[in-house]
Structures are given as structure tokens and as C-alpha cells.
Amino acid sequence: MVPMDATTTAATPAAQPSDDQQLADLQQRLLAWYRAHRRDLPWRRTRDPYRVLISEVMLQQTQVERVIPKYHEFLERFPTIEALAAAPTAEVIRVWSGLGYNRRAVNLQRAAQAVVERHGGVMPRDVDELQALPGIGRYTAGAVACFAYEQDVGFVDTNIRRVLHRLFYGPEVPTPRATAREIQALADRVVPAGEGYDWNQGLMEFGAVHCTARKPLCVFCPLQAHCRAYPAIQTALAEAPATTRREEPFTGSSRYYRGRVIAALRELPPGEAIDLAALGPRVRDDFGPEHLAWLREVVAGLERDGLACVAEERAEYDASDPDAGDPARVRVRLPH
């Protein structure tokens, strides 16, 4: 694997898996690094597929430090997949508080219910069967198959994508040189036989703490001799804009107000509903009658996602016709 120099622009992988000797050296270097530097995380102490699934869903777009206490709290409240499947959805959403992206909690419970109903409470081992569960994508299915059942399968998250792209294709900025499909195919091919668990944990750990998005530690990198991004990555990152995509401001965004609604509903006694007009001031400080139709749309979206239940006390109320009834009679609660 010869490093790509700064003037190379071709999108050809630096080392195909057919280059057995160099690939084996890369694999052994990464495995050695991981075994020397891995963090002691609670989900790495178990092969229980239920606990692995919980951790993988929680870790999506959420920092490890935030996940650790919620992981323990969630498992204390729902210690088995049967307990999660049978729990009131409102309780699942309440326990999920602090992790954000509340739809993940609902999908997680739906997946648990599917495992109980379709598989007798036993988590499938097959990636395709895992991916058939509600809310489970290719990454999560692969992670459960690997980290619970120690299968030699490839899967791709943000950290794995970055590390593999840099090693085999070069810098991912300003424009990636490999498609998502190409990276997935590469991930499938380079898993060392019998080492899938440590290999995938190692790729994720390496991307999280060493080969980071903005400040990779290239000078001290044990994979430097095999990396097609080195040394061009340092120049590419220095010249790249601070962010590669325009972020929607969180405060005032749709996701922000959806989170505010869920937070307000969590504060209600179990099973209790609240009038839309009473909910409004808890969601935004400037709430007025002119915001009722807007809030009705927000809670309707939450209802579609399984995060809220909406009841209309007046049958003649028509959400599409603001003159047909009083939106204040709409009542909202967490699902049972």
C-alpha cells in the first residue's frame, strides 16, 4: 500500500485485499493498537444481543459520555427484551429523556416487540433478519451480528467510513472519492477472519480518538505507512471549510420544538393529556392564538412517528379548516 502523494487525484483504492501481505500487516497494526488503547465501555463487557442493540441505538449521533449513564438507567428499567416489549411506550420515552432523537426509543421498542412476536424473544443472528426488524438499518444489524455473535461482518458508521476512506482512497475532503456502496463493499472484504469483533471495534475506536474528522494524529499514526491520505490529509483539512455541510440552527428548528413538546408531555402524570392551548406556552415563550395551527401540525407529526397521541374532543373539528372548531380542544399525551 503506497501512500498517495498530494497531487494524486485518482479514486482508485490504494490497496485491494488481494495485496495479502500488506493488508495483513495493516490489520495486525490496527488490532494491536486497539488492544493497547481500547476504552473500557460497559457494552464491551457483554455479548448479550439485547444490550448490544440498546448501546448501538443510543450511540447513534450521541456522545459516549452521555450514553453511559442512560445505558445503565435504561437497562435497570427494562432489563430484558421482553420487559421493553411489554412496557408502556410513554415510559420508554420518559426513560429515554436526555438522549434526543426520541423516535429511536419508539423504534427500539418496536424492534423488541418484533423479536418477541416473530422470534420468541431470541435476537436473530442473521444480518438480513436483523435488518428486517423495525428501525434497524444495515449498520445496526451488522453491529449486533458482530458484537453480540462475533460474526466476521463488515458495517459502516461515521468513524469506520472515515478511516477506511483515508486508508484506501485518500482524503475525504473536500469531496469523497468513494461512494457509500464502495465503502461498504470494502468494509466487507477487509475483515480479518476470526477477528471481526476487535477489528470493527478497532476501526470505530481509531476513528473516534485518533483518526478524527478535523485533527487526525498523523505524526503518531501506526497505520501511516499504509495510509493513502497521508500526508495530503493535513493540507486538505487545513484548506477545507470549517464544516462540509450547512447545519440547520437547532434552536427554533422543527426538531427543537418537537423536543420541547416531548419534554412537556414527559412532565405530565402517566396517562394524562393536556390541551393544545395549555401546551403551547410550555413549548415557546411567545406562544399566542396565532400559533395553534402550527402547534397542531407539530403534534400531528409526533403522532405519525408514534411519539404522541392526539385526541379531538369535538368531532366537528377539522384541522384543515381553522373555522370549523376550536383547536384548543385538541388534547395531547404520550402514547400508552
Image (spheres, helix red, strand yellow):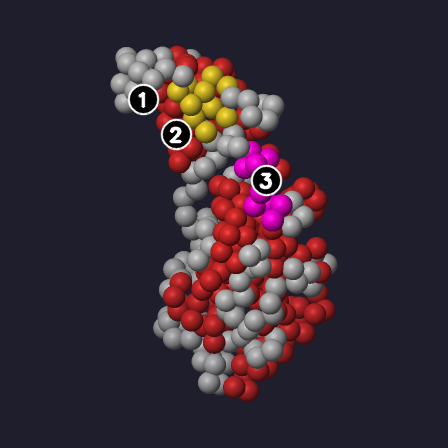
What kind of element bears circle 3? loop
* Residue at x 40% of width, y 63% of height: 180
Q: Are marks 2 and 1 in contact (CB under 8 Å)?
A: yes
Q: Verify whether residue 84 appears in magenta.
A: yes
What amino acid is at disc 1?
A: Ala
Mark 2 and mark 3 lie on one chain; the one further toward the N terminus is 3
The one of 3 and 13 positioned closer to us in this rendering: 13
| Mark 2 vs mark 3: in front | 3
Q: Verify whether residue 186 appears in magenta.
A: no
Q: Which residue is mark 2?
A: 300
- Label 1 Cα neighbours within 10 Å, binned few <14 / some 14-19 / many ≥20: some
x and y percentages locating residue 43 in the rendered image: 67, 57
Q: Which residue is mark 3?
A: 87
**Residue 179 in the image: above or below residue 64:** below
| Res. 207 visible in picture | no
Q: Which residue is mark 1?
A: 319
**Residue 328 in the image: above or below residue 203:** above
x and y percentages locating residue 140 in the rendered image: 51, 58
Mark 3 and mark 1 lie on one chain; the one further toward the N terminus is 3
187 to the left or right of 321 = right
The one of 172 and 135 positioned closer to us in this rendering: 135
What kind of element bears circle 2? helix
**Magenta region, residue range:** 82-91
